[in-house]
Image: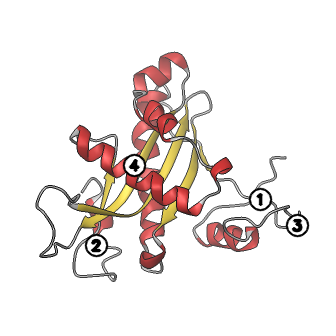
């Protein structure tokens, strides 16, 4: 587990510990590809297609090193996934079924010029909600941004972490993934403040 201090926080879900793994950390190419595509698939079941970044864009941003971000003023990204070992079934053929189940994840983007981060997506599998995984993912996302910031921002500390939400006072043409008022209440309960950036 990349963030071992978080692993005990959401243990109410099962006896199997949940781990929080950064996709910037050393993983086999197969494991990284599986975890990234599984999380992207979870996002695609949650967000409308026009609101979701392409998987290929995520791969490009994950491959930007903090030094490249500093030199080229490029956005760099991290994805942290909440995983647990998949329970084996008798009918499973060993080696054909991924050993880790993705329960959720967070994508964070670092903007080196301003030393600000953006929480782009936070998603928890519907069956895993209500067990503190989302809160742990937010903490892991903040730690991931902190870890990227100093090398990517010339030694500067992270200034702000931003989130996006629709304005609850503006009626939308189509329903949002989460009611904007509910979303803002969720963020406020986790210490974020609302700012107007229109």
Calculate the distance from the C-alpha at mark 4 to the C-alpha at mark 1.
Answer: 27 Å
Q: In percent of the image, x 30 and y 78: which residue is there?
A: 11
Calculate the distance from the C-alpha at mark 3 to the C-alpha at mark 4.
Answer: 35 Å
User: Which of marks 2 and 4 precedes in the sequence?
Assistant: 2
Quarter containing the N terminus: bottom left
The residue under label 1 is 166
Badge 3: few (under 14), some or many (20 or more) residues near its Cα, within 10 Å?
Answer: few
The residue under label 3 is 169
Q: Could you tell me residue 12's position as x and y percent?
A: 33, 83
* In front: label 3 or label 4: 4
Residue closer to the observer: 85 or 184? 85
Structure colour scheme: secondary structure
Helix, strand or loop for disc 2: loop
Helix, strand or loop for disc 3: loop
The residue under label 4 is 37
Q: In percent of the image, x 46 and y 51: which residue is there?
A: 40
User: Which of marks 1 and 4 precedes in the sequence?
Assistant: 4
Q: Determine whether label 2 and label 1 are within 8 Å by CB.
A: no
Calculate the distance from the C-alpha at mark 4 to the C-alpha at mark 2.
Answer: 26 Å
* In front: label 2 or label 3: 3
Vertical relation: 147 (above or below) 88: above
The residue under label 2 is 8
Helix, strand or loop for disc 1: loop
Calculate the distance from the C-alpha at mark 2 to the C-alpha at mark 3.
Answer: 39 Å
């Amino acid at each position: 587990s990349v963030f071992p201090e978080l692993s005990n926080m959401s243990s109410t879900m099962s006896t199997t510990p949940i781990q929080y793994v950064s996709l910037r950390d050393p993983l086999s190419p197969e494991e990284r590809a599986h975890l990234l595509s599984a999380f992207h698939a979870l996002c695609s079941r949650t967000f409308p297609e026009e609101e979701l970044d392409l998987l290929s864009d995520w791969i490009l941003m994950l491959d930007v090193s903090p030094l490249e971000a500093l030199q080229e003023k490029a956005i760099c990204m991290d994805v942290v996934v909440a995983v647990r070992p998949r329970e084996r079934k008798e009918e499973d053929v060993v080696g054909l079924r991924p050993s880790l189940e993705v329960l959720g994840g967070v994508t964070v983007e670092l903007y080196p010029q301003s030393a600000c981060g953006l929480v782009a997506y936070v998603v928890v599998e519907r069956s895993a909600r209500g067990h503190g995984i989302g809160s742990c993912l937010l903490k892991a996302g903040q730690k991931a941004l902190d870890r990227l910031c100093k090398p990517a921002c010339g030694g500067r500390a992270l200034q702000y972490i931003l989130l996006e939400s629709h304005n609850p006072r503006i009626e939308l043409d189509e329903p949002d993934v989460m009611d904007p008022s509910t979303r803002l209440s969720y963020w406020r309960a986790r210490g974020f403040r609302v700012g107007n950036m229109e």
